[in-house]
Amino acid sequence: MMHRSRYPNPLICRDTCIRRSSGLVAVVLSLMLAALSGCSSLSFDLGQKPAPAAMAPDLLGQYKAALAMMAKGDYQEALPNLKTAVAALPDRPGPHFNLGIAQYHTGNLKDAMASLQYTVDVDPEMAAAHNLMGIIKREAGEFDTARKSYEQALDADPDYANAELNLAILYDIYLRRPEQALLHYNRFMDLKDGHDDTVAQWVTDLKLRIKKLADKAADGKTS
Amino acid sequence: MYSRYIKDFPNDFPQGMEARQRLAELNLAVGNKRRYLFWLRQIVETDQQAGEAGTARSRTLAAQASLVLAQSSQEQFDKIALKLPLKKSLKSKKALMEKALATYRQAADYGIAEVATAATFGMGEIYRAFGRALMESQRPKGLSEDELEEYEILLEEQAFPFEEDAIAIHEDNSRHGSDGVYDRWVKASYEVLADMLPVRYAKQERSEAFIDVIE
């Protein structure tokens, strides 16, 4: 998937740069820091995002191997490498999110939620992480908080089709609000340019159910 | 010791209920199913006779006992296959079905959430099993191909209302989910519904398998 990363973010900047400081205070502070550290020049531009440190080649290799395992569905095998990546690069949301995915698929929901929460704390715009949190909450029967997570995913990325579909499913079979479900199924189909035969079938069935409910309500009024 | 206590102190309702519960558990532990069920029936009857003297604890014990008794009736119901002569096996199976359903209703009526969802799930499964048993019933001998086809259609017509009832009951149970009760029985009802009505209920949420980013 394409992840829309929104660097800089507050967590990363907290330790590595001075951000959003007023001009004068920032200049004075940076000069003090430069003097204290003995640097002849500042190594960062005020207000600019820091360049993330490069991943060491061996760590990168391990991380890529973990992603390859995940692509094959070998989540258990991917866990050690993901944990290594997260430990080495605690400020990177990507490894945290992948760790959360692997923990979810191996049934460790508590740790998965912690990893996903960390991910969205670091990068609140990561729609896919909000979406997976929604799924975990739905599976736990926390339907209202699941709805909020899906909505947060869509706030972060209005074109994120998975969250639109999951919100539709939530309204459809768990919250039993068919009209709301139809709205989100239709949005999902729009995002997919109508190309999802399975969901198209669900929409047809849902429309029939809505019609039956309307007919039943009309019968109730006339009788 | 527990039996003696019940006999010697018939008016000590709370302790008497605990003693009956303990006797049921002891018989279950040693595998004496007949005595286990006997004490469960005793728990239900004693709670019913207590009237206003009943407590939250006694109702919980009675609800749980009713549930186990219903599940026991359901096991007997499941064992009866519909064989020729159909009229005879049908009568036996129907009687056990009614007995189990009545006990499940009794268990659900105590209003204890987990017992109610388990009982509702059980009722749905009984209707589903009855519909399935009809479809799998032994066919009469000597039917021509056309007659057999006609017989199969007739069976489907007979089984269909039981399946419909099963769906309605499981849907009722699944509605507990939106009321904040999403226990294993509600989840199990969703699983049955996914099996019976896949287009409506077998809907899997979608998420990423992984994301190919480092930062």
Image (cartoon, rainbow, N blue to C red):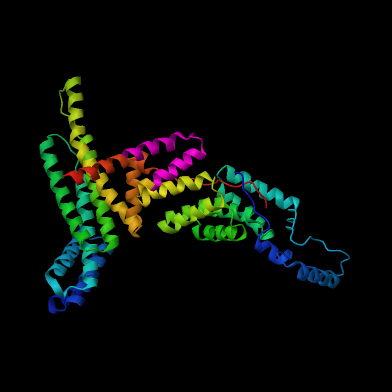
Looking at the image, residue B215 lies above or below residue B131: below
Magenta segment boundaries in residue numbering:
A180-208
The residue at 20%/72% (across/down) is B17
Q: Closest to the observer: B168 or A217? A: A217
**Residue B80 picture location, percent across and down:** 19, 43
Outermost residue toward the right in this view: A40
Decide which of B95, B172 is in the foreground and name it: B172
Front one among B132 and A145: A145
The reply to whether the magenta stretch includes residue A206 is yes
Residue B203 shows up from this direction? no
- The image quadrant that residue A207 belongs to is top left
The percent position of residue B34, horizontal first and vertical second, equals 19, 59
Position of A35 compared to B23: left or right?
A: right
Q: Overall secondary structure of the magenta stretch?
A: helix
- Res B202 seen here: yes
Q: Is residue B138 above or below residue B102?
A: above
What residue appears at the point 40 percent right and 46 percent down from the top-left corner?
A: A181
Task: Please give the name of the residue rendered at 61% of the width and 44% of the height, measured from the top-left corner.
Answer: A2
| Total number of numbered discs in the rendering | 0
Residue B168 image offset from top left, x and y in percent: 25, 46
Indicate the quadrant containing the N terminus of chain B: top left, top right, bottom left or bottom right: bottom left
Q: Is residue A48 left or right of residue A172?
A: right
Find residue B46 and report its horizontal and vertical position in percent. 14, 69
**Considering only vertical position in the picture, is B71 above or below B2?**
above
Residue A25 lies in the magenta stretch: no
Direction from residue A72 to residue A45 in the image, left or right: right
